[in-house]
Image: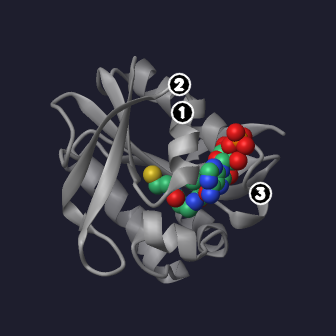
Amino acid sequence: MDISLRPLRREDAHAIVAAEDDATVRFLSGGRSTVQGTEEYVDRLHREASEGRSKRAFGIWADGTCVGTVDYDPQVTDGLEPGDVNIAYGVAPWIRGRGVAVRAVELVCGIIAERGVGRRVAIRASAENPASRRVAEKAGFVFSHEMRSATDVDETGQPEMFRVFVLRL
Ligand SMILES: CC(C)(COP(=O)(O)OP(=O)(O)OC[C@H]1O[C@@H](n2cnc3c(N)ncnc32)[C@H](O)[C@@H]1OP(=O)(O)O)[C@@H](O)C(=O)NCCC(=O)NCCS
């Protein structure tokens, strides 16, 4: 399977919405996505980038089809150290378990290194998300620490417990 990343575009909104399930909502988007909302998200990313924000999002493409997203954001600080670049990802349910997320993480780490965005990449995986922890481990990240989030909450409104995995570039 050929996996590649392309900067996220408004035209990818339908695919992103189609790729969402309960797990994506719980661990990535935080709410049900719509095509219009996703287009607005892409517009907002462009606008904020032009204003100096460093977050960048990519579509994950598998054999020519957009099957998910991965983003990096050096301005996430919750539970991280200065210089850390947070990454987050989601892959469509029908193509999970085939190494797509691990490859997407490797590719985005390559982009972060090439662009000199930060010294260390971090994945904050919910304690309730073994699949994401496994992705981190398979991509070569090492467990750093567990922390109670000051920004994210779980389904019951309690602070999310994150396990932080890091990879030095
Ligand atoms: C997490 C996610 C991106 C993984 O995508 P994926 O393409 O299936 O990932 P990969 O195939 O590269 O690797 C998944 C690994 O996790 C394992 N895994 C999946 N579900 C698991 C579970 N419940 N418990 C333990 N391991 C699990 C898979 O078996 C695989 O490991 P293996 O190759 O050793 O068997 C996908 O499940 C997803 O989109 N979840 C919802 C959004 C999310 O959780 N994002 C993370 C936010 S940081």
In the rendered image, the vertical position of residue 12 relative to residue 147, given as above or below: below
Asked if residue 88 lies left or right of residue 152, the reply is right
First in residue order: circle 2 vs circle 3: 3
Disc 2 from disc 3: Cα separation: 21 Å
The amino acid sitting under disc 2 is: Gly
Along the line of sight, the residue nearer the viewer: 139 or 62? 139
Front tag of 3 and 1: 1
Task: Indicate the amino acid at tag 3.
Answer: Ile
Any atom of ligand 1 within 8 Å of the CB at mark 3? yes
Q: Which of 89 and 38 is in front in this view?
A: 89
Q: Do the residues labelled 3 and 1 touch (CB within 8 Å)?
A: no
Q: Nearer the viewer, residue 17 or 22?
A: 22
List x then y, in percent, for residue 124. 36, 47
Instruction: Say which quarter of the image contains residue 3.
Output: top right
Q: Is mark 1 on a helix, strand or loop?
A: helix
Residue on which the image places disc 2: 140
Task: Tell me if 159 is positioned left or right of 167 in this view.
Answer: left
Q: Is residue 149 left or right of residue 115?
A: left
Around disc 1, counting alpha carbons within 10 Å, would you say few (fewer than 14), some (14 to 19), or many (20 or more)? Answer: some
User: Looking at the picture, how far across and down is residue 27, in whole percent?
Assistant: 45, 64
Where does label 3 land, which residue? 95
What residue is pinned by disc 1? Answer: 137
Where's the C terminus, which quadrant?
top left
Q: Is residue 93 above or below residue 90?
A: below
Q: Is mark 3 on a helix, strand or loop?
A: helix
